[in-house]
Image (cartoon, helix red, strand yellow):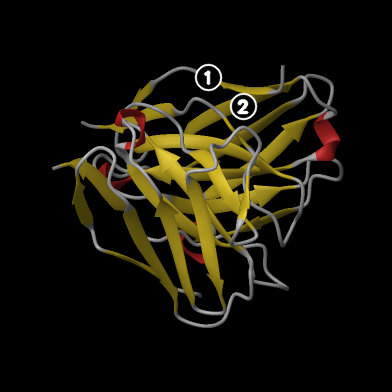
Amino acid sequence: QVQLVQSGAEVKKPGASVKVSCKASGYTFTSYYMHWVRQAPGQGLEWMGIINPSGGSTSYAQKFQGRVTMTRDTSTSTVYMELSSLRSEDTAVYYCAASSGWYDDAFDIWGQGTMVTVSS
Amino acid sequence: EIVMTQSPATLSVSPGERATLSCRASQSVSSNLAWYQQKPGQAPRLLIYGASTRATGIPARFSGSGSGTEFTLTISSLQSEDFAVYYCQQYNNWPLPGREFGGGTKVEIK
């Protein structure tokens, strides 16, 4: 079945980086664009950016420009989200989610989420 | 950036009653509006896209309406499994691919 499986929980110190993976299965990897969305504890959803699994092009929310990097590995149908210079406010569940449109489509498929805790 | 505002923040409803949730956009998003349901400890699930089209497998008691800047999600007769947080999301940012979410409405048991 169509699914996105994310890597496990991470604990990082302030100033470090974290890299979260999202492995797609059950569909053609390049058929869906992949987004990253985060959710701080008890808070709402925040869109971080998008990657085109086909060509690797990306677009990031202004808030994360310079700190986030999204990449993909077509050989393993996996996308990655790396966030650097971590601070306590980055403690959140990070989700990958897929849409069929770059500009104009909702998120049909979601990963299960990866908890990232930033603490000294 | 388009700002999405949901109201109310919390809605207390008895099982079997009707729930009406609102979402307002700071500028027109046409019909490029989605609704998601999120239960504790779970990822969001797509309910409605295109403002009014139910996603695959979504029961008919969920309906969406609106266009432009004002949108509504209606749950006609609340079931126990419908108590959750609901988010709206716009996807009308061309030429940028941004997808802003509203702050959410928690539907709780009255």
- Dot 2: what SS? strand
Residue shown at the point (85%, 28%) measured from the top left: A28
Nearer to us in this view, A36 or A119: A36
Nearer to us in this view, A89 or A100: A100
Residue, disc 2:
A22
- Residue A27 position, x and y percent, is 81, 25
| Picture quarter with the C terminus of chain A | top left
Residue, disc 1:
A7
Give the answer, above or below, for where B77 lies relative to A120. below
**Are the residues flagged by discs 2 and 1 in contact, CB closer than 8 Å?**
yes
Q: On the image, which quarter does residue A10 sit in?
A: top left
- Residue A73 position, x and y percent, is 77, 28
Q: Residues within 10 Å of mark 2 (few under 14, many from 20)?
A: many
Task: Kindly identify which chain the residue marked by label 1 belongs to.
Answer: A
Q: Is residue A16 visible?
A: no
Residue shown at the point (76%, 53%) measured from the top left: A101
